[in-house]
Image (cartoon, rainbow, N blue to C red):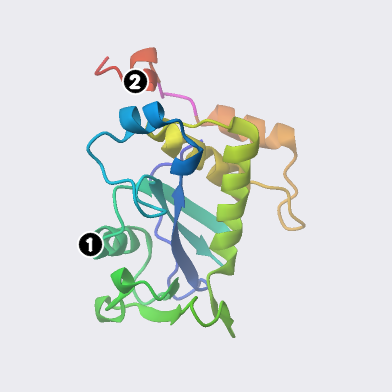
Amino acid sequence: MKSGGLMKMGGSDSGPIEVDETFVGGKIKNMHRSRVREKYKGQATSGGAATKAIVMGMRDRETRQVRAKVIPCVSREVLQNEILNHIEKKSTVYTDAASAYYKLAEKDFIHDTVNHLNEYVRGQVHTQGIENFWSLLKRGLKGTYVAVEPFHLDRYVTEQVFRFNNRATKDNPLADEDRFALAMSQIVGRRLTYTQLTGQGAD
């Protein structure tokens, strides 16, 4: 379900791009102490996002397509490098007011922000579309898959992106069998071994 060689989003012929990140993981207060000690030994567990995985996402309003991936941290370097890698320069980019997005305009983007402390929408400036994707992702993780290890999270995110980008709409009336055929067509020449799947080393 993972697409390779994708062209950059945005550009002069495309709509604005919403960019946001979210945190995925169980709450420490709901975990048994032994589980916390085993999973987070030596790490600080204070703060809501301290022990959670981070997923960054982008949504093109014109094409209604989403891209998302697990990232190691929310530093300015990581977030802005992802934007540079996936979005054409001179595109309009909407984000929240996180300091990691500062100075995007200096990298040849049209950048506007919405401060969630005061507002969620200011005219066309908002990140509601990508936040809707986050709600769908988390609903699936909590309600369908229940327990997802961080090692495999990127695969679950990829699946949700595939289903979202190939969902049935009035402009794109894909049925379940169409999505299945598309997914199967993309396995040609690809191989996933049990060793790779379980993270036990090189094949």
Residue 136 image label: none
Q: From the image, tell me which residue sits under label 1.
A: 77
Question: Can I make out residue 26 in this image?
Answer: no
Q: Quadrant of residue 96?
A: bottom left
The first of marks 1 and 2 along the sequence is 1
Q: Which mark is residue 196?
A: 2
**Residue 194 in magenta?**
no
Residue found 44% across the figure and 51% down from its top: 23
Magenta extent: 187-191
Q: Residue at x 44, y 79 (%)?
A: 113
Residue 79 visible in the current orientation? yes
* Residue situated in front as seen by the camera: 18 or 39: 39
Quarter of the picture containing the C terminus is top left
Structural crowding at the residue carrying mark 1, measured as other residues with C-alpha within 10 Å and reported as few (<14), some (14–19) or many (≥20): few
Instruction: Give percent across and percent down for residue 74.
Output: 31, 58
- Front in this rendered view, residue 77 or 14: 77
Q: Amino acid at mark 1?
A: Glu
